[in-house]
Image: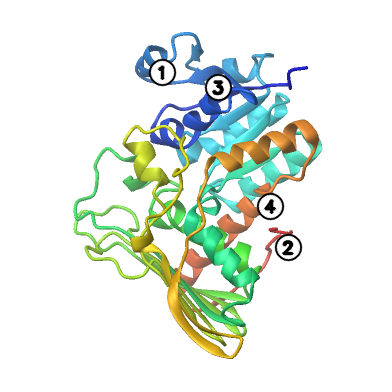
Amino acid sequence: MAQKKIRVAVVGFGISAKVFHLPFINMLTDKYELVSILQRKGNEAHEQYPSVKIVGDIDELVADTDIDLVVITTPNDTHFPYAKKALEAGKHVVLEKPFTNTTGEARQLVDIAAGSGKLLSVYQNRRYVSDFRTMKEIMDKKLLGDIHEFEAHYDRYRMEARPTAWREAPLPGSGILYDLGAHVIDQALYFFGMPASVTADIRMQRPHARVDDYFNLWLDYDFTKVILHAGMLVREPGPRYMIQGTLGSFIKYGEDPQEARLRAGELPVGEDWGQEPEAIFGLIHTEKDGKIIKEKYPSLKGSYADYYNELYESIINGQPVKEKPEHGYNIIRIIELAIQSNKEKRTVACTELMDVGYY
């Protein structure tokens, strides 16, 4: 007997849809069937998917009774109203990060999802990359002892702001803190839980910037200090991650290859998919069984596809969803507190977080 397929509608047809979602929905043909795409401008979706229904309006899309799951990949200001409409229409929802623009919106979605009985999940794809999985293994095995410092960087070099990019326009939810901060904040909360306080330095560094393009956040966990950084004026990046523990250190350069390969048009198949080259394996320098070791630590494979495999099990077989809506709320709450800290030039207590499990 063939297993049930989840009928999917994708909202938006930009980079997010074409790189991070559609390749996996189309690959997992035993689990998913793409039935509809919302594209507000242009005809590209119809040209690439002539057999798929193309709509231009969210109300028309969520009214379609053939749809089980709505994947929302449109700009941040649409996340709340579109997710709300889809949930109230009885659809499961995957929402791109950041979850919403405000904690008020985020809390409403958490409550609507709980009342609807439908699944609401945030697409935190940076949990499905090689460096994140490798760090989790190292910390789970206590190879560094107790972690007292964790530092994550998401640095790029792009001197000129992009005038047509909505992420760089002065709109609610725009800027590097909402865009890239959502990734590293989620990783910090996943590894260490709820911080006691946040201290933030958020800036516009480039001459023509209209939104923040730099941040440095310090999250205090009493014994553990977490430093999260991103900037657009880093031509030669340093380590992406640095973890310091009571027994040793882990230093990681380079980036999971999945995104670059997907952007280049590759399909996510093959034994080497998600495998980092040995040249960018992290360095572990620690003590094990009384001996000092300093060597490359093989990176685990990343796999964005695992998100959609696990999502299927949650929707069809009732397995707990790993990327909970409460996680999305907590990210937005930390962002709002960081903005307050930067504005008031002081450390701010982390209050009103939802203490839910991350594993």
Question: Of callouts 3 and 4, which one flags the residue occurring earlier in the amino acid sequence?
Answer: 3
Numbered disc in front, either 3 or 1: 1
- Estimate the x, y position of residue 90 in percent, counting from the top left: 73, 25
How many discs mark residues in the rendered view?
4
Mark 3, residue position: 58
Mark 2, residue position: 355
Give the quarter of the figure containing the C terminus: bottom right
- Estimate the x, y position of residue 83 in percent, counting from the top left: 61, 34
Secondary structure under tag 4 reads helix
Tell me how far mark 4 sits from mark 1, CA to CA. 32 Å
Question: Of callouts 3 and 1, which one flags the residue occurring earlier in the amino acid sequence?
Answer: 1
Question: Of callouts 2 and 3, which one flags the residue occurring earlier in the amino acid sequence?
Answer: 3
Q: Are marks 3 and 4 in contact (CB under 8 Å)?
A: no
Tell me how far mark 2 sits from mark 3, CA to CA. 33 Å
User: Compared with residue 187, is residue 117 higher up or lower down, i.e. above or below?
Assistant: above
Q: Are marks 3 and 1 in contact (CB under 8 Å)?
A: no
Numbered disc in front, either 3 or 4: 4
CA neighbours of label 4 inside 10 A, class few (<14), some (14 to 19), many (20+): many
In this view, the residue farthest toward the top is 51
Q: Amino acid at mark 4?
A: Glu
Q: Nearer the viewer, residue 112 or 51?
A: 51
Numbered disc in front, either 2 or 3: 2
- Estimate the x, y position of residue 131 in percent, counting from the top left: 48, 60
Question: Of callouts 4 and 2, which one flags the residue occurring earlier in the amino acid sequence?
Answer: 4
Q: Amino acid at mark 2?
A: Asp
Q: Specify whether residue 302 is in view.
A: yes
Mark 1, residue position: 45
Tell me how far mark 3 sits from mark 4, CA to CA. 24 Å
